[in-house]
Image (cartoon, helix red, strand yellow):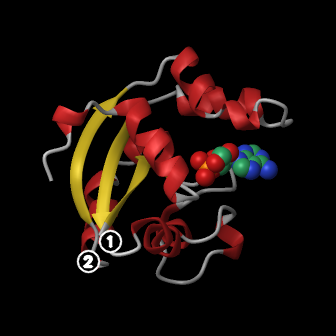
């Protein structure tokens, strides 16, 4: 068992899709072991996406991520990082497989409904960026 970090993004919370996305997560064998609904500040969003700060879409990405509340989550399961990436589908919904969250719900490459960590190392960093240990009760 290991953990990954997830964000249900503004395009999805705005369209009231939190429950629908959580159902897909749970139906695919991952447990939501921590979850909170927050509004990202500009500073918090810029820190989270600092790896993309030199990209042309960075400004737009920060504007989007701070436009509506998001749901931050810790997911647990067997091979949680890889498993959640498979459940999410490709970053660009045009390339996402049928049955994935992004194929079903994402609007475009930016408003792509969910984020998931890309490695175990980043999952640990991203979980700590949003959650204290006493908020993760298993
Ligand atoms: P995420 O998996 O959270 O990681 C970085 C985010 O930047 C990505 O999902 C998208 O929301 C956004 N993104 C990635 N590529 C592009 C792009 N080419 N144009 C606009 N936004 C993008």
SS for callout 2: helix
- CA separation, marks 1 and 2? 5 Å
Residue 12 visible within the image: yes
Instruction: Name the quarter where the N terminus is drawn.
Output: bottom left
| Mark 1 burial class by Cα count in 10 Å: few <14, some 14-19, many 20+ | some
Instruction: Judge by depth and name the residue closer to the eye, 12 or 85.
Output: 85
CB under 8 Å between discs 1 and 2? yes
Residue drawn at (75%, 37%), measured in percent from left and top?
A: 52
Q: Position of residue 59 (x, y in %)?
A: 74, 26
**Whether residue 37 is situated above or below residue 43 in the rendered picture:** below
Q: Quadrant of residue 83?
A: bottom left
| Mark 2 burial class by Cα count in 10 Å: few <14, some 14-19, many 20+ | few
Residue drawn at (86%, 35%), measured in percent from left and top?
A: 56
Q: Position of residue 21 (x, y in %)?
A: 34, 62
Residue 111 visible within the image: no
**Whether residue 33 is situated above or below residue 40 in the rendered picture:** below
Residue under label 1: 24
């Amino acid at each position: 068992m290991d953990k990954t970090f997830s964000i249900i993004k503004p395009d999805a919370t705005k369209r009231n899709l939190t429950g629908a996305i959580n159902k897909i997560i749970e139906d695919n064998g991952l447990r939501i072991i921590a979850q909170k609904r927050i509004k990202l500040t500009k500073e918090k969003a810029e820190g989270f996406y600092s790896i993309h700060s030199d990209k042309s879409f960075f400004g737009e990405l920060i504007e989007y991520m701070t436009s509506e509340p998001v749901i931050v989550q810790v997911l647990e399961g067997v091979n949680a990082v890889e498993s959640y990436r498979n459940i999410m589908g490709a970053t660009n919904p045009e390339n996402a497989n049928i049955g994935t969250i992004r194929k079903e719900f994402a609007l475009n490459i930016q408003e792509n409904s969910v984020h998931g960590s890309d490695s175990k190392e980043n999952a640990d960093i991203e979980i700590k960026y949003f959650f204290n240990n006493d908020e993760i009760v298993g």
